[in-house]
């Protein structure tokens, strides 16, 4: 029971630190407050609280990493200090945002409120059952134990990231250069508990799941999606089977689901940036503070994805290329200002990753795939059969196995066919390019990997597709909402148009 108390206290400290940072970042883009930071709606609160969970775990790992990088030891007092600091930083923010969750607005239909309550009720049930299912078992999969869990134990026992064990290629065995976000968060909880307990250390993935869903809902609300529609899309994201309840999703301490969380948050804010930039382009008005803050959040989330698993680096490159293509096509008359804005995204991402890349050079090389060194035209020219197999495999997994992994890919196709012109708006085109780019990167990695493509892609495509499923749901939400056309988005006007 005392361990439960310590874990709850630790999680609240992590969340408090994240909520404080989220509030500082979001105050300039709040729904009604503008640059004054006024908090006026429960929807804004959902975004702050959700982003607080995401950034809280991210900043905990980054803080520990920088602390260890300069040679300072980890300890239980350090963990308690971080926890208390989170309480103090977050308590005032939480109090400022505290209001009843469902405040009926003037003119809002009671039916809309009931839809919201129904969706949120299911979400809370999903989060509770996911958390319960997660902590019922210790770490048991290979990645959980041999790649991330083992490093967390070493960090806890040796109290440093400079441990000789982490630099011993025979001890770390497989992927010694894997990032440390998960091990550092697990070690933080071990320092609070004073012991290794690989059940309680698994609380992070389901909490990231909850934070991802809340952030998704909050961003949709802030971009003009009606609350009842945002609740429906939120529930669609929460019930993707590949995320929950699949055993390799958010109920395991592997890296694929956390990467899915950080990557979706990054894509959300890049999509939000393009939505804001496109509207400003059409109306001749632009808030530099708003777009700058949006891209800072996107950069933070992108850096955290890459600090979780190496796939995050590829996703960053795909995001950046898609963003540059869209801005080049849609904002040719303001390339300088657009490029300056995008530089913030790249700069923040680099600030997170550069210390990690520096530390990574000190780690041993064992069985890394060395993709870039194997990227040759001769290799690609001889891979026609492998390419056909990869395409058939992905089509089957995405569309013919939908009952097992989710209907999101069918939803993308149907949404595109329903509103084809809307799909080429900057923010929607970015999502399409991002999905296609990520899938292309997966196929390319399979073609140049030293292992057979059937083993490389066949054994990992289901886990990789988790990482971009959130992007698919965001594309669906963007296609089926009216704010992209600049139309009114309140519930009453939508009902009038339907009639």
Image (spheres, rainbow, N blue to C red):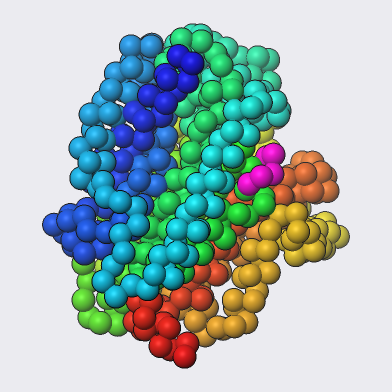
Count of marks overlaid on the render: 0
Name the outermost residue toward the right: 385
Front in this rendered view, residue 237 or 176: 237
Residue 375 rendering spot, x and y as whole percentages: 67, 50
Residue visible at 17% across and 56% down in the picture: 38
Where, by quadrant of the figure, is residue 406 drawn?
bottom right
| Magenta stretch, overall SS | loop
Name the outermost residue toward the left: 36
Front in this rendered view, residue 211 or 100: 100
Say if 55 sits above or below 119 in the image. Answer: above
Say if 413 sits above or below 263 in the image. Answer: below
Residue visible at 62% across and 70% down in the picture: 412
Front in this rendered view, residue 432 or 42: 42
| Residue 324 visible in the current orientation | no
Residue 122 rendering spot, x and y as whole percentages: 54, 52
Residue stretch in magenta: 244-248
Say if 187 sits above or below 397 in the image. Answer: above
Residue visible at 55% across and 83% down in the picture: 419
Name the outermost residue toward the front: 110
Residue 243 rendering spot, x and y as whole percentages: 62, 48
Left or right placement of residue 443 versus residue 196 in this view:
right
Residue visible at 68% across and 40% down in the picture: 248
Where, by quadrant of the figure, is residue 175 drawn?
top right
Left or right placement of residue 357 versus residue 299 in this view:
right
Residue 387 rendering spot, x and y as whole percentages: 79, 60
Front in this rendered view, residue 295 or 36: 36
Left or right placement of residue 440 versus residue 285 in this view:
right
- In the image, is residue 254 part of the stretch drawn in magenta? no
| Residue 108 visible in the current orientation | yes
């Amino acid at each position: 029971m005392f361990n439960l108390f310590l874990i709850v206290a630790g999680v609240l400290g992590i969340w408090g630190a994240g909520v404080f940072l989220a509030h500082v970042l979001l105050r300039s883009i709040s729904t009604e407050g503008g640059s004054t930071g006024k908090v006026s709606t429960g929807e804004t609160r959902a975004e702050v609280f959700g982003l607080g969970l995401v950034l809280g775990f991210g900043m905990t790992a980054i803080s520990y990493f920088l602390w260890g990088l300069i040679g300072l030891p980890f300890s239980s007092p350090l963990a308690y200090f971080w926890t208390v600091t989170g309480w103090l930083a977050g308590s005032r923010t939480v109090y400022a945002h505290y209001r009843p969750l469902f405040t009926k607005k003037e003119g809002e239909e009671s039916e809309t409120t009931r839809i919201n309550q129904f969706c949120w009720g299911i979400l809370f049930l999903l989060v509770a059952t996911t958390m319960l299912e997660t902590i019922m078992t210790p770490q048991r999969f290979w990645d959980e134990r041999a790649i991330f869990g083992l490093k967390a134990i070493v960090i806890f026992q040796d109290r440093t990231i400079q441990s000789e064990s982490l630099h011993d290629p025979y001890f770390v065995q497989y992927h010694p250069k894997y990032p440390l976000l998960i091990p550092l968060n697990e070690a933080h909880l071990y320092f609070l508990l004073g012991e290794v307990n690989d059940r309680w250390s698994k609380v992070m993935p389901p909490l990231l799941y909850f934070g991802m869903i809340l952030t998704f809902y909050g961003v949709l609300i802030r971009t003009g999606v009606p609350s009842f529609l945002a609740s429906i899309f939120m529930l669609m994201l929460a019930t993707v089977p590949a995320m929950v309840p699949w055993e390799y999703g958010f109920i395991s301490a592997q890296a694929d689901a956390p990467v899915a969380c950080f990557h979706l948050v990054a894509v959300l804010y890049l999509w939000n940036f393009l939505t804001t930039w496109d509207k400003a382009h059409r109306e001749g008005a632009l808030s530099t503070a708003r777009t700058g803050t949006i891209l800072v959040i996107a950069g933070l989330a992108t850096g955290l994805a890459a600090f979780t698993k190496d796939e995050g680096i590829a996703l960053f490159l795909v995001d950046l290329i898609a963003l540059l293509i869209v801005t080049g096509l849609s904002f040719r008359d303001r390339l300088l200002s657009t490029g300056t804005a995008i530089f913030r995204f790249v700069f923040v991402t680099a600030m997170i990753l550069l210390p990690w890349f520096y530390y990574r050079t000190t780690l041993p090389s064992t069985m890394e795939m060395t993709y870039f060194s194997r990227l040759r035209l001769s290799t690609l020219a001889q891979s026609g059969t492998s390419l056909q197999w990869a395409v058939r495999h992905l089509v089957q997994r995405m569309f013919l196995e939908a009952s097992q992994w989710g209907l999101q890919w069918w939803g993308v196709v149907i949404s595109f066919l329903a509103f084809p012109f809307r799909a080429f708006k900057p923010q929607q085109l970015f999502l399409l390019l991002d999905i296609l780019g990520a899938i292309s990167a997966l196929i390319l990695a399979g073609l140049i990997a030293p292992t057979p493509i059937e083993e490389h892609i066949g054994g990992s495509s289901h886990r990789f597709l988790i990482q971009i499923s959130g992007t698919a749901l965001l594309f669906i939400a963007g296609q089926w909402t009216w704010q992209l056309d600049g139309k009114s988005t309140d519930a009453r006007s939508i009902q009038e148009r339907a009639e």
